[in-house]
Amino acid sequence: MLASAEVRETSTRRRFYASASAAWTGLILFSSTTLASELCEGAFARLYGATLGKHSASQNAFELTHFLAEKGLHLTLFCVFGILMWQVFTLPRWPRIGAVLVAGLIVGSSSELLQTLFPGRDPAIRDVLVNGFGALLGTAISISKSRD
């Protein structure tokens, strides 16, 4: 009886993480749109002006901070994606790492390609690599928290 309950729990858990991964992928793809870009730019400008902007009038400081914030967002989105995908795949460790990385690169590439459809967006290979690194970071976090 216990094995049957464990199978149901595992199945329910995987469905939950598959649904969460699909929703998170939707968020990532939305982030490729002009609307998402405008919302993020506005939020960044307000936060920068309210904090660092008071202490630095340098355009270089603004551009560096903007670059780091943008790449930090990529890392965060794909780190969470990696954590979610780790829970979806049930492969042995090394193939599972590969599957999460491939999934991250596919979604990251799709996100960058999607940007070609929206004005003001600029797809970049560098961002695909940052996205893949974020998925690997999420995988590393998942491995470190694993009970295996």
Image: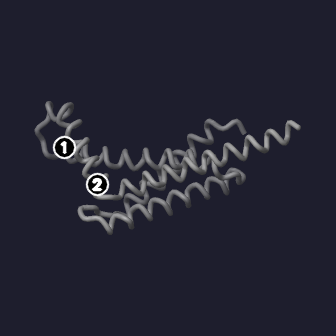
Q: Residue at x 66, y 38 (%)?
A: 146
Q: Quadrant of residue 55?
A: top left
Q: Is residue 90 shown left or right of residue 119?
A: right
Viewer-nearest residue: 105 or 28: 28
Q: Residue at x 44, y 64 (%)?
A: 109
User: Dot 1: few (<14), some (14–19), or many (≥20) neighbours within 10 Å?
Assistant: some
Q: Residue at x 57, y 44 (%)?
A: 140
How far across and down, in percent of the image, does residue 22 sit? Answer: 53, 53
How far across and down, in percent of the image, does residue 79 sit? Answer: 49, 46
Q: Secondary structure at mark 2?
A: helix
Q: Quadrant of residue 30?
A: bottom left
Whether tag 2 and tag 1 are in contact, CB under 8 A, the answer is no
How far across and down, in percent of the image, does residue 85 sit? Answer: 58, 50
Q: Which mark is residue 62?
A: 1
Above or below: residue 107 compared with residue 76: below
Going by the numbered disc 1, the residue's amino acid type is Phe
Distance from Cα at disc 2 to Cα at disc 1: 22 Å
Q: Secondary structure at mark 1?
A: helix
Viewer-nearest residue: 63 or 118: 118
Of badges 2 and 1, nearer the viewer stands 2
What kind of colouring is applied to the model shown? one colour
Q: Is residue 8 shown left or right of residue 124?
A: right
Viewer-nearest residue: 74 or 130: 74
How far across and down, in percent of the image, does residue 148 sit? Answer: 72, 39
Residue assigned mark 2: 35
Above or below: residue 86 compared with residue 107: above
Going by the numbered disc 2, the residue's amino acid type is Leu
The mark nearer the N terminus, 2 or 1, is 2
